[in-house]
Image (spheres, coloured by chain):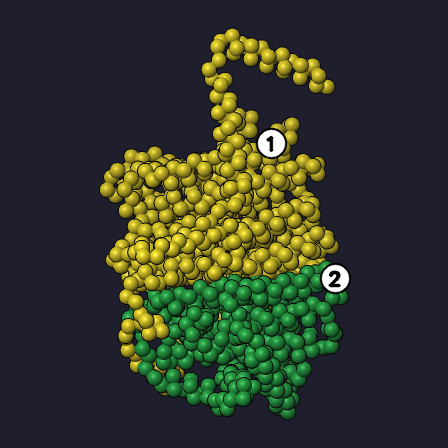
Amino acid sequence: MLLVLLLSPLLTGFVRKAKARLLRRQGPPLLQPYRDLIRLMRKEVVLAESASWLFRVIPYIVFAGTWVAASLVPTFRGGLLFSWSADLIALIALLGSARFFLALAGLDVGTSFGGIGSSREVMIASLAEPAMLMIMFTLALIAGSTQLTSMAAYMASGEVGLRVSLGLALLALIMVGIAENARIPIDNPATHLELTMVHEAMVLEYSGRHLALIDLASELKLLVYLSLVCCLFTPWGIAGPVATPVEIAFGIAVYIAKLAAGGLLLAVFETSIAKMRVFRVPEFLGAALMLALLATLLRFVSGSF
Amino acid sequence: MTVAFTLYNVAALIALAPIALALARLRWGSAIVYCASLILTLTLLVLALLSLFGHAEAPAVVLPLGLPWLGAHFHIDALSAFFLVVVNVGGAAASLFALGYGRHEHTPERVVPFYPAYLAAMNLVVIADDAFSFLVSWEFMSLTSWALVVAHHQVRENLRAGYVYLLMASFGTLALLLAFGLLAGADGNYLFDAVRASHPTAGLAALVLILAVVGAGSKAGVVPLHAWLPLAHPAAPSHVSALMSGVMTKVAIYGFIRIVFDLLGAPEWWWSMLVLAVGGITAVMGVLYALMQHDLKRLLAYHTVENIGIIYIGLGLALAFKVYGMSFAAALALTAALFHVFNHSLFKSLLFFGAGAVLNATGERDMEHLGGLIHRMPQTAFVFLVGCVAISALPPLNGFVSEWLTFQAILLSPQLPSWGLKLLVPAVGALLALSAALAAACFVKAFGVSFLGRPRTPAAANACETDNNSLAAMFFLSALCLVAGILPGIFIDALAPVTTALVGVSMPRQTGLDWLTIVPIAESRSSYNGLLVFVFVTLSGSLAAFAIHRLASDKLRRSPAWDCGFPVASPATQYTASSFAQPIRRVFGTTIFRAREIGEMPPPGSTAPARLTVELHDVIWDTLYAPVAAFIGYAAERLNVLQFLTIRRYLTLVFAALVLLLLVLAIWP
């Protein structure tokens, strides 16, 4: 649990650095996100006059929901202590709760930018979430379980092999992950150009420790999606429930390597593509939904796909 | 004995109606009536719980009423007991709420007498044990609720709503009447036991199924028979809206389950396909309609349509599994559907109460005129938020658990041998996922626009918190939502006798498991622990808050909103309900609602404002209802000629009819 919390700003820093290097810029140092977070935490909160109590509680809810979701994903070791307390559907729904509250926060102060962000966010979510659930269906049908640890163990067992439905699901998962984490081409995490913001517009009124928590939560969310891809599609190197320290150390090393590879790919993808118009997004996500549905249908029709 | 006691209570409720008529004008009249209703529904609730958990098969009671050779039969089995619980939890909460809410009623004599009668009617439908008393109670329920819908008859809209409701209710009852007529056959087996014993032929059973889907579905609000629901539910006073939406639709579901699962005998494979398709379409259409609304109560009413769809999906899956003998899967799907019935009755009543409190405080149902209510009505806002989270199927509240169970049931369906189902079930699963996501969007809009932001009108700015009775009812329901969300095992176990009676087996016992987890099939397959999720989220949230406040900073300063440097004082610059839904309207609405945005720019030099009009069409109304209504109007116009004939022509008509009938008799073999 602590590992993911500590690693997530590093991942964001890494992606930023990689993107900058690809543009032949120097880029911020790797540890910059930590510094940002610490500085934000120390600053006082400037709260809008029309903000309610809900606005002040939401950062903690969003952070807690995302963190609990993150701690449910097996990263370097299988057999998590509380993995049975929630499965993949619950994990998606927890992230959904976090988003639900964040969208409410966007509406709370009563400004037009908050509204624009929330309204676009729920539009994106209303397509991304079903796609995510369909992906989950496919994987659950292959693994015969919705428990993440059992799924990861099954995927690692080598009985799976290459499958058409898995490929479709991976593609859809990457598309959904990009949309959910507000990355290019759906949204630009670095933008402050008013009319293109989605996520940034929603959190525009936050400052100080509240903003720090929300930033940390979105960094955690990126990590969750990357870890999901890692543990479901590249489950190698995850240590078993009973593992020696060496195996655990190996698992951590492999996990970090996987994250680095994922982050690098993300950076390359982001620099090589332009941002979409907002109303092209439904087509992008609709494609993800259709791919995921196709994967599920294939699984329903025959067990061998 | 429980049946007899239940009947005494119901009789007392009916007797309360004329007393209420006398009391209504008095100062404390409505309070007395609602108090009495509260006590009676609580007693009924206790009786229902006793019969649900007692498992003792109570003997049927026969009253010398109704058809002379039949009498009125009443009986409580597990299914009836469960629905009695749903009816009376909703009834008790509504009565408690009305203790406060009813005080603001201008014409209590139009509401109070019908209210206890309506409660009694819903109880009677659930315990009726023969077709005749079932239909009479059903019609009694429709008529009393109609009277409540047109209680505020000065508003033209309400009269129209009442008219459409009356038509649709009669149509639904007609379908059910035909269904029971077919089931009873030529011998007139009106007793449910006799119907169970007779095995209808396949064609007959198919006809009865379709009639049941139409009859019960029109009451429950299945698309495309939902047209009356969003008109009628909001028109009634709010506590009655809560009952209609939260409870009466469930009574309709009861009617469907009773006919299809219990009376009709062994199902066939295509039945489940019909029910699943209806459920999937209803779920998505309901939530899309809801997203387009800006009337708070109408939004909630459309949302009922969505939840009915989810329940029908569960029932369809249960039917499919039952056909192919997969009893455990059928038990899981049926439990999911019934649990959702219970959950929906909780949070939908809660949300309607909240809307009622807002209506009382501001006199507004239109969300475009609300905003910022969280500052003026913090407690109502809190319970409304609980309802919103629960209905959006977000953990750790109860809506999530029942949808989770439905998803688990869908995941078992690849084992079904039928190809049609193999193709349909994943599509329905996608529709369910889509409707869940859209529901969250819809309730961000409902809560965000009416409770958050800045007040859009003086009425919203000067609202005050609602009274204690109303708050007590709402807090009671939100507490139940939380308990059902974090300790679902108890509720699932309570449903075991119902599923055993209907599909033969029940889900494995849940309450004995470690940490109160629920495990529908096997632990390696899936498990969910609402309690732990709740504890984890609360712990990590408060831990973070504590740590940051202690170690980093706890200073806070108020200042004007930032808004990218251009804050505008007018609350009209906020996002409204329509603008919030605009992206979704563009994605889904252009085909389904033929939504169009028409922008009118003033000519150069003119100071007139520019206008943006949004055009929405209700496709179902335009293509289904309007032509039927037009045809009936046309036919009535034509047949009107018959009213003004001379006596000779009437005699000719009578003679011609006689000859025709004799000819038919002669030709008929």
Q: Which residue is mark 1?
A: B181
For residue A189, say whether it is visible. Answer: yes
- Does A173 sit above or below residue A261? above
The spot of residue B363 in percent (x, y) is: 30, 50
The spot of residue A223 in percent (x, y) is: 54, 79
Check the rendered structure and report the hue given to chain B: yellow
Determine crowd level at label 2: few under 14, some 14-19, many 20+ residues with C-alpha closer than 10 A.
few
Determine crowd level at label 1: few under 14, some 14-19, many 20+ residues with C-alpha closer than 10 A.
some
The spot of residue B73 in percent (x, y) is: 53, 35
What kind of residue is marked 1? Gly
Which residue is at the front of the view, A121 or B488? A121
Question: From this viewpoint, which residue is outermost toward the front?
Answer: B605
Q: Nearer the viewer, mark 2 or mark 1?
A: 2
Instruction: Using the image, tell me which numbered label, if any, was put on residue B423.
Output: none
Pointer 2 and pointer 1: residues touching (CB < 8 Å)? no
Q: Which residue is mark 2?
A: A302
- Does A295 sit above or below residue B132? below
Callout 2: helix, strand or loop?
loop
Q: In which quadrant of the rendered view does residue A102 lie?
A: bottom left
Colour green maps to chain: A
Residue at x-position 63% and y-position 46%: B274
Q: Chain of mark 1?
A: B
